[in-house]
Amino acid sequence: MKIILTIINFVFLSILVTSCQHSNTIKPSVSKISHQPEVIDKSCRDGNAKLYDECNNQIQILQKAVQQASNENKNVIVVYGGEWCIWCHVLDKYFHGQFRTFDYKWRDSSGDIFEWLMNETVTQTEIDDAIALNQFVADNFVVAHIESEYTNGRDAIDSTGFDSSNIYYYPYIFVLNEQGQYVSSMPSTDAIENFEIRESGGEEYRGYNRKILLEQLKKLKIDTNNE
């Protein structure tokens, strides 16, 4: 009888440990990202915007981000784009440490609403990379989503000392110094070898190589420190 109970206890503990390990793999902790705008008004346009405020003053949004960054001892990283930009939504998910399953809903440039459920095949190393990326963004940046199509987004960009007429790809990603002035930009993601990922597990996909993305963000941070 004692032998049977010992075996049962051993099996139970094995299941419990395996379950805990599996849980830690599936749901690692992520850090909160500071961002502006903090809230999107659902009464703005069709109410489907997720990241970009398409109705309000972008200069004021940027100024709030600069003030928040000052309060939190961080730098502003600007992601200039729009709701139509699927890669802008992908970048935001990656900043937040998401992996494996991505459920996107966005409005394209024609005004049509699209939904795309993407599944990513990941290893534990890639999950660790997702958490490391999220932690670095959370520790170092306030993310400012500046809208390019319906608002004064270009005026907001120009206010940083950078000429918005030089922007020819999206998302356009750059960092500001403590005074809210332009420091440096990330190259176009499709110009960096092996940066963009367009297939996972044999299925069409949109994503980034997280190691490369983290390297690029670290370069931007170093540029701000050298100001």
Image (cartoon, rainbow, N blue to C red):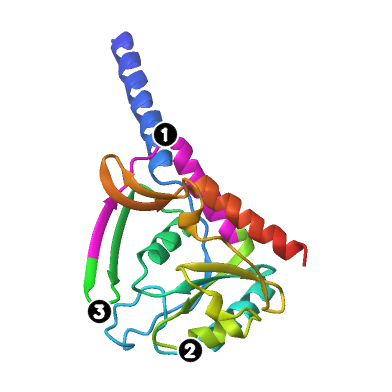
Disc 1 crowd, CA 10 A, few/some/many (<14, 14-19, 20+): few
Q: Position of residue 54 (x, y in %)?
A: 39, 84
Q: Nearer the viewer, residue 151 or 188?
A: 188
Q: Nearer the viewer, residue 143 or 208?
A: 208
Residue position for label 1? 21
Q: Nearer the viewer, residue 31 or 108?
A: 108
Give the quadrant of the C terminus: bottom right
Residue position for label 2? 152
Q: Quadrant of residue 84?
A: bottom left
Disc 2 crowd, CA 10 A, few/some/many (<14, 14-19, 20+): some
- By secondary structure, the bulk of the magenta-drawn segment is best described as helix
* Secondary element at image label 1: helix
Give the quadrant of the N terminus: top left
Amino acid identity at mark 2: Asn
* Secondary element at image label 2: loop
Image check: 178 left or right of 97?
right
Disc 3 crowd, CA 10 A, few/some/many (<14, 14-19, 20+): few
Q: Earlier in the sequence, mark 1 or mark 3?
A: 1
Q: Position of residue 174 (x, y in %)?
A: 59, 68
